[in-house]
Image (cartoon, rainbow, N blue to C red):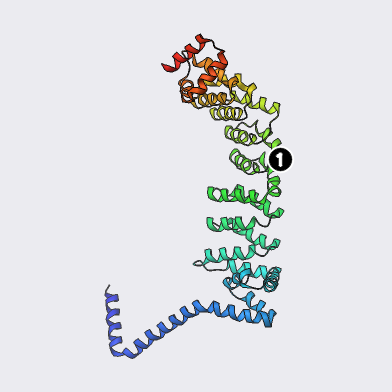
Amino acid sequence: MEILHKSLINFSLFIQKYPLYYFTAIGLFLIVMIIFLIRNKYGSKHKIKKIKTLLSKTPDQALDKISNNNLDITAYFLNEENLSPDEYILIKKYLSKPEQLKKIYYKIISSDSKAREKEILSGISILSKLSVSQAADYIITFLYEENPLIINTAIKKLAKFKTNKVIYSLIEFIKYSTDSNVLNNLKESLKKMGKKATDKLIPFIYEADPSTQIWYIDILGEEQNKEFYQVLLNLLASDNPEVKIHVLEKLSDYELSDKIIDKIITLLEDENWGVRSKAVKILGELEITKAAPALARKMTDKSGVVRASATEALFNLGYEGIKYIFELAKKPEAPKEITDMIKKQDIAFIIESLEHIYQGDREQIESLNTKLSS
């Protein structure tokens, strides 16, 4: 503190003794700062104007200027709106050369820490406009950055290339990433890449862990084809309940054979209530009437979710399913979910169903009415 105090006293004495030097130094500093700010604000505009002039007179010099300037200048001249079609094609062709791509890449990775994110994002955008494989190779390297924004930007830009190397690089990256937002972005990008990408996922699905299998199933579900249909059938034998649930969800989009329907019916006895509930729901939505007896047994399942789903599924089957609901509802041990579900239905529909199923048998109808009104 004493040293600081003495320094301040000495500085104060210096100002009093040499005020001209002090204020001159302050003035020079302010002038330099003003020049820097003006140059920073208007420098790029001046450079762009000069390069545009050169483009019409000496294109080679203009291209050299673009190559040796910062990324902001390069980005400007890769915007179609800023140029004539001929100028844009000329610049894009020039910047797509291997040596120019390498130069752009080194500018990106050489940026200082303060502006690093901005420079990398700008660089990825520039590379993505140069539709050559080497540009994609450079973008791939940014998948392994720590910054999620940079990773997501790289993924989105890579989706436009659709080369085998890009597709396999994205598939490989699945094993590396644990960020849910990044994985969702990756999933959407692979979907957008279409059949070429999804077909390459299939060989990886069997060796993947359950969570990754589910991830693959969600992507492949966008492509309804015979090959994926077979994959779903194979995965239906999985030991993992979540995988089976996802498989059942995707299978509901296909026209199912009797053999597959029989397999789904067997899953009504699966040990996992989620699998049972999903199988019940699909059989009801597809209105599989031959599944009615098996669905009826699920109305007394140990899971309340399964019981409610089974009742709803049987209602979907029309009179063929509703008769099982009425028969169980008459019994004293009928689960509450069953009677509650009946009470929620339109009264006119229930009366019509009773008349149709019991053919005017007043004793049966009254028996059920008494149970429901109690």
| Image point (57%, 71%), residue name | 72
**Camera-side residue of 370 and 92:** 370
Badge 1 density bin: few <14, some 14–19, many ≥20, Cα 10 Å: few
Where in the figure is residue 185, as x and y percent of width and height?
57, 51
Residue 172 percent coordinates (x, y):
64, 49
72 with respect to 132 (left or right) = left
Q: Where residue 299 sits: x, y (%)? A: 53, 21
> Could you tell me which residue is drawn at 62 percent across and 29 percent down?
286
Q: Please tell me in which quadrant of the rendered image residue 221 appears.
A: top right
Task: Look at the image and tell me whether residue 179 can be seen.
Answer: no
**Residue 356, percent from left and from top:** 57, 17
Tell me the element at label 1: loop
The amino acid on which the numbered mark 1 sits, given as a three-letter code, is: Asn
Q: Quadrant of residue 98?
A: bottom right
- Residue 35 lies, with reference to residue 247, above or below; the image says below
Confirm whether residue 59 shows in the render: yes
Asked whether, in this view, residue 344 is left or right of residue 182, the answer is left
Q: Nearer the viewer, residue 217 or 338?
A: 338
Q: In the image, 297: left or right of 102?
A: left
Dot 1 corresponds to which residue? 225
Q: Where the N terminus falls, by quadrant?
A: bottom left
